[in-house]
Image (cartoon, rainbow, N blue to C red):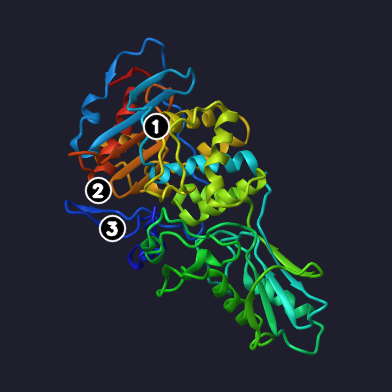
Amino acid sequence: MFGISKRTRLAIIAPAVVFALAAALTTPAVAAPTPTPVPSPSPTQSPTLSPTPMSTPTASAAPCSAAAALGQKSLGQFYGYVIDTATGKVLLDTRGSEATPSASVLKVLTVAAALDKLPADYRATTKVFSVPSAPGTIVLQGGGDHTLSRMTGDSFTTYSNAARLETLAAQVLATWALDTPVTKIILDQNFFSGASYTSAWKLSDRTNGYISHITGLQVDSDRANPDLTSKAYSGYRSTNPVNQTGKFFKEALQGLADDASLVVGRTPANAVLLTSVSSAPIGTWLQHAISVSDNTETEFIARHAAKAAGLAPRFESIEPLVVKTLAKLGVDSTGLVMKDGSGLAQANRVTPKLVAELLAKSAADTGPLSQLVSYLPVAGRSGTLATRFTGKNAMARTFVTGKSGYIPGLYSLAGIIKAKDGSKLSYAIFARSAGSKKVGYAARGALDTVATRFYQCGLGLTK
């Protein structure tokens, strides 16, 4: 779930590599990966699952034990829930109704709420206003677009079809009719409300590049150097993305605002719109957030969805937003705790049953929710699963999709499996440190082995 190191950034750009996880964290036992997967320079729609295998599922499938896979010591304390999406039959329930920390698997809940609340053509818009009563003053008004970019020319960031500050500046320069320069720039970040950083996150999550402050106005998710064409790329996030954006906007105005003061404030009532730029459609955000597990992106998505639902766009609205969405879908939200929308907070809690039921609903849906399944990374092919399911688990490549997750002490995986017998299963599995049981990096491969066994067993799955 976390940010990008120099080493992994180069891995993104190298043509032989699709995705890489961020630089590894270290535990007393083995090296563990950082919780944010590496963004893609030009994200594309996740591939769909492979065609249905030749065999056909039957109601009398022979028992197929998953005991050996579930008994792997590296899983620590295991939680799992598996559903036959065609009938709703529960095939596996191991602590399925017990709440556990979630890691990035929680992102599927946030994205589900966004699919429910935001139309497919929804975009975030950044605007520039003049102020007739104050010649020389302009307003840069954020619209909650984390992808707004300060890149110029052929440089690019991880976000596809992002709006650019240079476009706004060029339009201001083309329409500026006053003989005097811009002397004041009001930076309006009030599209969101409440705290921009939660106490549920570590301060180091920002300096390590795992998450930015969540503000209504910022560029490139506040990365220190977001240019993926640069060897000096840096995912470090600042303490004040709003002022940073103002500085970059001044530079983009090419001398028109060299001496302008930057003031954080609100757009005056008599302000007149000069120009605006809009982000890519919300679907582009949703696919990218799930595919590469972008924390900042998911938090922005949560706030846009909350606002569309009539809630305040702040941390405290995320859980009520998701609970309402789950109730609408008929999914029990018992045990759910959402301190954020991305899964970064250690205090988040979710049950495997809830996640598996939501995914089963998505797999059966013919409306907007069906997009959730299409966003999931495909084992061995895309997103955070591109380099996973190796060795004996390679047999499940292309047949398993899943949202992966990691925070210290917890590994998770949840998605849809097109099983060998032709059935379609939704699953949610978690490996957690608890009591004397500890998990490390090996838990990731162990979860892949469990999912592979689900693929092999299909409707015959037993514990």
> Which of pointers 2 and 3 lies earlier in the amino acid sequence?
3
- Check the picture and name the quadrant holding the C terminus: top left
Kind of residue sitting beneath label 1: Pro
Classed neighbour count for the residue bearing mark 3: other residues with Cα under 10 Å, few (<14), some (14–19), many (≥20) = some
Residue 441, label in figure? 2
Query: Is residue 120 in sight in this rendering?
Result: no
Residue found at x 60% / y 57%: 193
Indicate which label's residue lies in the foreground, 3 or 1.
Answer: 1
Q: Are the residues at dot 1 and dot 2 in contact (C-beta closer than 8 Å)?
A: no
Answer left or right for 422 relative to 120. Answer: left
Q: Is residue 95 above or below residue 310?
A: above
Answer left or right for 75 relative to 58. Answer: left
The residue under label 3 is 24
Report the Cα–Cα distance between label 3 and label 1. Answer: 26 Å
Which is more toward the observer, 109 or 185? 185
Give the secondary structure at mark 2.
Answer: loop
Location of residue 251 in the rendering, given as x and y in whole percent from the top left corner = 60, 82
> Which of pointers 1 and 2 lies earlier in the amino acid sequence?
1
Q: Is residue 99 above or below residue 155?
A: above
Residue 352, label in figure? 1
